[in-house]
Amino acid sequence: MLINLTDVFTSEGKDRRESLAYEENSFSYRGNNYMIREKSPVNMTFTNIGTGKVLIQGDFKLVLEIPCDRCLEEVAVPLEVKFEQEIVSPENENQEERQSEQDFMLGYELDTEAFVNGEILVNMPVKVLCKPDCKGICKQCGHNLNEGDCGCDTFVPDPRMAAIKDIFNADKEV
């Protein structure tokens, strides 16, 4: 959805509020698609803070379904996003420098979907766990270790002892 901000850019001290519905049902991040379980309207306030400058403030809430980084079970991850960003008009002298930073602006129009996607991206969690003591999955069979032991041999020999092990194996072969 595009919002025309010409009136806010041109009227000093102008204040405008918008409440928009976020239309997407999933969010793409690092090549994965995450389903959006719940979402609130995006509340935005546009304030003229000087010649050709507008301050965007707002907030919204989402609940994403993201797999646990250890056991791959789906986890409901709530995101409370608050944002505050200054944008400049397309006629500003330094516009060429700021254009790469403002890829959500098309002239005087704000692409709300691109703006909101950028804010979600900034607020994505680095690591998602279903619980703090998640045991993950078995490296051999892939069983979820939170549901119980799988019975696979998990013995990992000490690599520092490999040379001694080779000596003993050499004696047995002769």
Image: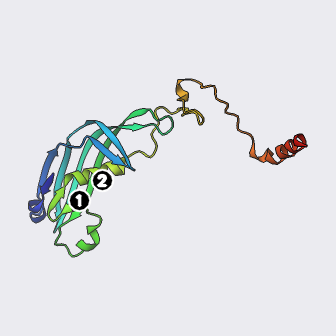
Location of residue 20 (image quadrant): top left
Q: Is residue 128 above or below residue 8?
A: above
* Closest to the observer, 114 or 26: 26
Q: Check disc 1 and report the residue beneath it.
A: 104
Q: Is residue 142 above or below residue 117?
A: above
- How far apart, in angstroms, are the residues tagged by discs 1 and 2? 9 Å
The amino acid type found where label 2 is placed reads Gly
Dot 1 alpha-carbon crowd within 10 angstroms: few under 14, some 14 to 19, many 20 or more: some
* Closest to the observer, 117 or 67: 67
* Closest to the observer, 162 or 25: 162
Estimate the x, y position of residue 92 in percent, counting from the top left.
19, 72
Image point (45%, 39%), residue name: 128
Q: Secondary structure at mark 1?
A: loop
Residue pushed farthest bottom?
93
Location of residue 170 (image quadrant): top right
Q: Left or right? Give the position of 69 relative to 1.
A: right
Estimate the x, y position of residue 36 in percent, counting from the top left.
29, 38
Q: Secondary structure at mark 2?
A: helix
The amino acid type found where label 1 is placed reads Phe
Q: Earlier in the sequence, mark 1 or mark 2?
A: 1
Q: Check disc 2 and report the residue beneath it.
A: 118
Estimate the x, y position of residue 173 in percent, counting from the top left.
87, 42
Image point (29%, 67%), residue name: 100
Colour scheme shown = rainbow
- Check contact, mark 1 vs mark 2: CB within 8 A: yes
